[in-house]
Structure formats: structure tokens, C-alpha cells
Image: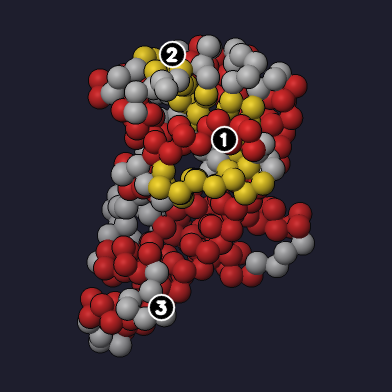
Amino acid sequence: MSKKVAFIGLGVMGYPMAGYLSKAGHQVTVYNRTSSKAQQWTNQYQGSIATTPAEAAQNADFVFACVGNDNDLREVTIGEHGAFQSMRKGSIFIDHTTTSAAVARELASISASKGIGFLDAPVSGGQAGAENGALTVMVGGEQAHYDAAEPLIACFSKMCKRLGETGKGQLTKMVNQICIAGVLQGLSEAMHFAKASGLNTDEVVEVISKGAAQSWQMENRASTMVKNEFDFGFAVDWMRKDLGIVLDESRRNGTHLPLTALVDQFYGEVQSLGGGRWDTSSLIAVLEKIKHNN
């Protein structure tokens, strides 16, 4: 059944996600801070443009957001022209931004006082996953809200699961980023070592990817990593934002994450090389001190 949907934030992730909702037959209204991106979206997909998040959310059954960070999310929800100003009782807000668990709980409490549902639903799969409608979505929030929203989330995901109450989606995304950071550092060191040893890295990956060392990152990033090609989606700047959230949470829950903290420092070195917009496989640049003229 067609639903009235708002989508706030048309970045590399939100743009195709909103597109899949439109292609599924839902009535989509989009809002983006840069209005030209919204115009581009409506040139490509069926839908309408709003000039504020509040205007986009008016009369919507579901409001989706995929913005930058905690402060961006607060602005588009509880800001002067935020979605919470106009959302009707019984509607549901689904946040796909990677944020702190604390802001998810804060906004869920505010939305509940207004009779609005709230799901924290960060995604994994990167730009390619969004464009292919194959994202993994980790959700926190009430079961009834999840059950209502899941058919719409399924428009752009291959895996969607509720992990528990509000904040559990964001906490699960933190686990995801811890894993990715560690794997990418290990892969970077392995490829750096293989090159220095005079090995053919393509042949090495062909062999070891069939054994216990196999990973998505190895299959998809090893060959580009050794060519110093770092143009494949999720940027170092965003990973540092995510790892900052992870390390803040670890201080709260008393966990010790020495590898994650170290990899975060290495990403800082990538930024100092001018690689803030390079993708996360660029950790090898620190080992090889590669500088690009981007």
C-alpha cells in the first residue's frame, strides 16, 4: 500500500534510498539543505520538494532522515523548522544517520511526548549498497514501530533487524565500525608487506581470499588499495566521526578498545595527508606515505 513519505537528506546514501521508496510507489517528498540536489532528485524520480524539514514531514506517515551527525539530526527534528514541529500523531520517524546512542534516546523521548514513533536505524553497505538497494539496517525502537516501518525500509535493504530498544541500532553500528576499522588496518598492513616482499598482490589475494583471511574488504578493496585508488564511497572524515562516537561510548560503558583508538589515530594521519575525502581503505597511505593532489 502506498504511503506518504518524507525523506530528509539527499547525500550519497539518502539520494538513492529515497529513490527506491519512490520506485516502490510511495508518495515521496524530499528535503535537502542544498536545494539543487533536491531538484536533481525530482528530475530523476517521482516526488515533490519541500523547503524545510517541517514542510516535508507535514501529513507524512513516515519521515526518513539521513544527515551528517548529532547536531544535524537535532536541527532537522527539533530545530525551528524541524520535522517534529509538523509530524502528526501516529507517524514514525526513521533515522538512518550514524549518531550517538544518546541523541537517539533524547529524540525518542521528545517524539514520544508528541505521540510520534522513533526508530534509530543506521545503515551499513556504503554508497554501493545504497545504490543497489542492498543496505544492512540495524534498528532500535519499539517493536510496533519497527513492524510498521520494516516494509518501507525493505525497499532499499537486503537485511533489516530490530536489535532492541532505542539506541540499540546505533550501538550495533558502533560494533560494525569497530570491526571494519580493525579489518582495514590488517588488510593495509598485509598488502604493504606483500608489496615490500616482491609478491604479486593480485595472486596473493586470489589465494588467501579462499581461506580464513577472507573478508568483504579483501574481496572489494585489496586490489584498489595497492593501486592507491581511494575513490570508493565512505570517506575518512565520516569514519573518524563514527569512531569518535565509538570511543565516547566506550568511555561510558568502560570498555577498552586499543586497536580502534589506534586506527582512529591512523585515520587522522590520512587526513593530514589530504585524504579526508578518500575512502576508508586509504589506511595504506599512512604506511606508504602516499600524497595525492586531490
The part of the image, by quadrant, that contains residue 243 is bottom right
Cα separation between marks 3 and 2:
48 Å
Image x and y of residue 125, in percent: 41, 51
Cα separation between marks 3 and 1:
37 Å
Say whether residue 200 is left or right of residue 39.
left
Image x and y of residue 180, in percent: 48, 62
Task: Give the secondary structure at mark 2.
Answer: loop
Residue depth check, mark 3 versus mark 1: number of the one nearer the observer? 1
Q: Of residues 33 and 8, which is closer to you in this image?
A: 8
Q: Of residues 176 and 266, which is closer to you in this image?
A: 176
- Local packing at callout 3 (Cα closer than 10 Å; few below 14, some 14-19, many 20+) is few
Image x and y of residue 89, in percent: 65, 16
Which residue in the rendered view is the most extreme toward the front? Answer: 1
For image coordinates 26% across by 68% down, the residue present is 223
Q: Of residues 37 and 161, which is closer to you in this image?
A: 161
Instruction: Give me the disc on residue 213.
Output: 3
Task: Give the secondary structure at mark 1.
Answer: helix
Q: Quadrant of the N terminus?
A: top left
Q: Is residue 189 above or below residue 17?
A: below
The part of the image, by quadrant, that contains residue 31 is top left
Task: Give the secondary structure at mark 3.
Answer: loop
For image coordinates 59% across by 16% down, the residue present is 87
Cα separation between marks 2 and 1:
27 Å
Instruction: Give me the disc on residue 147.
Output: 1
Name the amino acid type tagged 1: Asp
Asked if residue 104 shows in the view, the reply is no
Q: Is residue 124 above or below residue 287?
A: above
State which tag comes first along the sequence, 2 or 1: 2
Q: Which residue is mark 2?
A: 50
